[in-house]
Amino acid sequence: MCRPGTDYSDLGAAITRRAKQHGCSVVRSYCGHGIGSLFHTAPNVPHYAKNKAKGTMKKGHIFTIEPMINLGSWEDRTWPDNWTAVTRDGSRSAQFEHTLLITETGVEILTAREDEPVMEWSEEKVQRN
């Protein structure tokens, strides 16, 4: 979906749709961002549906996608250390980040590693007592 001509606002709808398919929610307090001469710069890339992100992807744009996906509510809070983000309802959450470069015909994931295994969820890997 990341290629020239895609609106940045479309990413949030796709991420939310995928999260909801698995009974999860998406935190709305944080967003991806552009990478340029400044580290955190335009565009803002919200990860939730019905966002008001401005802009369209163009060749040469570099930005991050870094959603926080929760098993419970989308609401979060920050601990007194002003860094640690947790879910308001105490549910489990996962956050990941990739940096993308829009190419002439699509996208290159700049943070992809060679021979990196694809992460897949599996019931057998759940470690709950």
Image: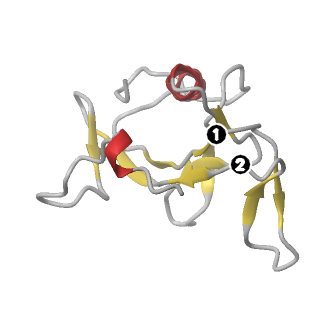
**Which residue sits at x=45%, y=57%?**
127
Asked if residue 15 is positioned above or below residue 63 in the image, the reply reads above
**Residue that carries the numbered disc 2 in the rendered image:** 91
**Residue that carries the numbered disc 1 in the rendered image:** 71
Quadrant position of the C terminus in the picture? bottom right
Give coordinates of residue 115: x percent, y percent: 11, 58
Give coordinates of residue 50: x percent, y percent: 71, 19
Is 110 on the left-hand or right-hand side of 8? left
Residue sitting nearer the eye, 113 or 35: 113
Tell me which colouring the rendered structure shows: secondary structure
Question: Residue 121, can we see it?
Answer: no
Is 62 on the left-hand or right-hand side of 75? left
Would you say the residues marked 2 and 1 are in contact, meaning their CB atoms lie under 8 Å apart? yes
Total marks placed = 2
| Residue at disc 1, secondary structure | loop
Residue sitting nearer the eye, 62 or 83: 83
Which amino acid does the dot numbered 2 rest on?
Answer: Ser
Which amino acid does the dot numbered 1 rest on?
Answer: Leu
| Residue at disc 2, secondary structure | loop
Extreme residue toward the right, this view: 80
- Disc number placed over residue 82 in the picture, else none: none
Give coordinates of residue 11: x percent, y percent: 52, 28
